[in-house]
Image: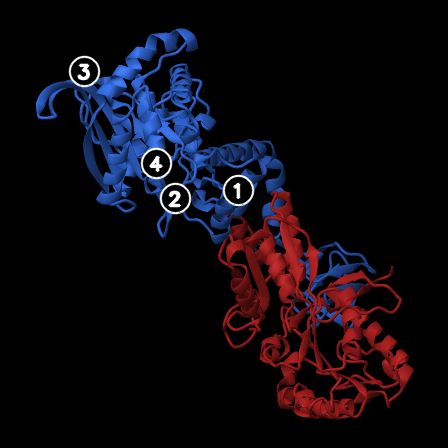
Chain colours: A red, B blue
Amino acid sequence: MPVISYIQAVTQALREEMQRDEKVFVLGEDVGKRGGVFRATDGLYDEFGADRVLDTPLAESAIAGVGIGAAMYGMRPVAEMQFADFIMPAVNQIISEAAKIRYRSNNDWSCPITIRAPYGGGVHGALYHSQSVEAVFANQPGLKIVMPSTPYDVKGLLKAAVRDPDPVLFFEHKRAYRLIKGEVPEEDYTLPIGKADIKREGSDITVITYGLAVHFALQAADKLAEEGIDVHILDLRTVYPLDREAIIEAASKTGKVLLVSEDNKEGGIISEVSAIISENCLFELDAPVQRLAGPDVPAMPYSPTMEKYFMINPDKVEKAMRELAEF
Amino acid sequence: MGVEKINMPQLGESVTEGTISTWLVQVGDKVNKYDPIAEVMTDKVNAEVPSSFTGVIKELVAQEGDTIAVGELMCYIEVEGGGSADVAEEPAKNEPAVEEPAAEEKNDQKIKEQKQEQHENKDKTMKKRYSPAVMRLAQENDIDLDQVEGTGKGGRITRKDVEKVIATGGTQAKQSQETVQEAPAQSSEPAPSPAQPTSASSNIKTQAGDKEIPVTGVRKAIAQNMVKSKTEIPHAWMMVEVDVTGLVEYRNTLKDKFKAEEGYSLTFFSFFVKAVAQALKEYPQLNSTWAGDKIIQRKAINLNIAVAKEDQLFVPVIKDADDKSIKGIAKDITDLAMKARNGKLTSADMEGGTFTVNNTGSFGSVQSMGVINHPQAAILQVESIVKKPVIKDGMFAARDMVNLCLSLDHRVLDGLVAGNFLARVKEILENTNKDNTPIY
């Protein structure tokens, strides 16, 4: 099985879906000739032409709006927000229109759009190039939010997102793009949206997380394994709606749960995970549910020292894991 | 002069590594800060890497064509003043090399000692803080958490600790542990579950010369049952006096022959037991049990009799006493008493009693207030038969008199029915003679 990077998995999934279905097309800023600022759509313009790889104006509400309209007319658009931070002008389109149209039209209309956006920090991107925005959308029934951690999951889930009959937000960690590599089958496959995945089996503590933090947790777990601490890691993969069953099972497995997210702590995805655990697992819990997340400040700082302080990393995850294991 | 490191810089948002395409400097070249030192190719950009310092290139660590992760070493540069890189490292390498391991060892030793110390006076503040999981597991598996060693913070018992205990067969049951701690039990009787009342006076002080006798086995069971009976059952009491002159006469004419033929004694008590069994058939109210919201009237008439042995008291059962002749009852009494004295009573011998007849007369008692054998409704005490002058047919006469004392559960029984019952027993006994009372 070839080893490819996270972003190559994105490109591969897009190419295969465009080859498979003529209705699939890509639109966004610089996605065409330039191949995207991260090169996610590299080569697609040459292969599929300007009609299916659309360079748009710098207007996110238009990107989302055009995509939503096309989707409602039966197309399968994949819209790219150049950075997740830029999605804000499109929030009205996404929440008020895309998320609600099936419900509002009594099932007559639907909106099978996929909106891709690179999120996350630790790349000296500062305020407008580092944010995690999933929590903004994570209480909007009608939306699905996918945040994969590995190239394998990227390909399988992005394909599933394109084929999903309803709107899917697909957030890719920009630092993972070239940092994370992994084996990805060349053949066509999809992975179920809404299903979490056990990335490591363990019996001492449970870590539930998603995105790049999964790798931090895996690295920390390897270190702790040398000390005899056995870590169970659940990768949410889909952060909305959450895979309640998998969360309950993982939490019950060890009774000691650490939730990790790069996003600001208050009101994040992991807060909801914590609520699910406390609703269902009281008599399994052996320690208070712990959260490790970014501080509640408005944005990722630019100063390297402060960015380092803001970002979670394997050391911070390891420390939190050890404390929980020792409790 | 000092040495500084130049590392691969972050060259773009998603860039994690770069490939050195060309070195723009060579070892010995003097460079100024911000002068380009190498061309680097990444996925996104081709960029020149600037020098972070002014100085002389000392060593190119990476070769052209090498791919290096962001933050990793590219080259060393010699700078004016003290550098932060090798200066400290290099001279340090040789000199303390010999001493280092020793120092480390010492440190290790110290740490070990510290750990040891920590282990010894380990913080136990969390020992009794149980998590929901620990509580649930302990309850479901009957684990005594006092016996579980906690490996968590502050001696906390973790879920894993409990799971380990369960996997290895759980803790010793609390009850059996208590038995073990106390003096060896004197009887093989099953120890009753410990209850509060019996140990209530444990703070009584002893004085010199006092002897302490541990309460175990049967003594403990007796104590518990008595407390239970006296605290739970509202006792009422009544007594009748019975003229058993005829019975005594009858029995005395039979006893030697009986003993010779049967091999055991025909006791007075057998006659009393028979009379009680007969009367209970007619007054089943006394053969019953208080059960909270109902009264259970027993069909079987199984009579407990009290058999004393040193400091122990047993109440074995004559099963279906109403089915048996006086001889049969006499035989049962003999068997049960023998078994009790030899410690051979089985739990089958002790079970199923519905009413108790107590031969207090054997100790010479003439009057006593029995404690009901919980959960029965009444107990009858048969006192000593005493020859007394009584008025009979307007004249003094020497008669064999006996008191029958009845304690009754006033929740179940009232004076009237109890009185009628006693009157009936009295009637049967007073009419016992060779003409109307066969013993076989």
Subunit that carries the residue with mark 3 = B
Distance from Cα at disc 4 to Cα at disc 3: 50 Å
Instruction: Please give the residue where the numbered disc 1 appears in the rendered image.
Output: B161
Query: The disc labelled 1 sits on which kind of residue?
Result: Asp
Q: Where is residue B6 in the image (x, y as percent from the top left)?
A: 67, 60
Distance from Cα at disc 4 to Cα at disc 1: 58 Å
Q: Which of marks 2 and 4 is nearer the N terminus?
A: 4
Indicate the quadrant containing the C terminus of chain B: top left, top right, bottom left or bottom right: top left
Q: Which of marks 4 and 1 is nearer the N terminus?
A: 1
Mark seen at residue B297: 2
Q: Which residue is drawn at 60% across and 77% down?
A: A138
Subunit that carries the residue with mark 1 = B
User: In the rendered image, is residue A16 in sight?
Assistant: yes
**Can you tell which of label 4 and label 3 is closer to the viewer?**
4
**Can you tell which of label 2 and label 3 is closer to the viewer?**
2
Q: Which residue is drawn at 50% across and 34% down?
A: B112
Mark 3 lies on a secondary structure that is loop
Query: The disc labelled 3 sits on which kind of residue?
Result: Gly
Q: Which residue is drawn at 65% across and 84% down?
A: A87
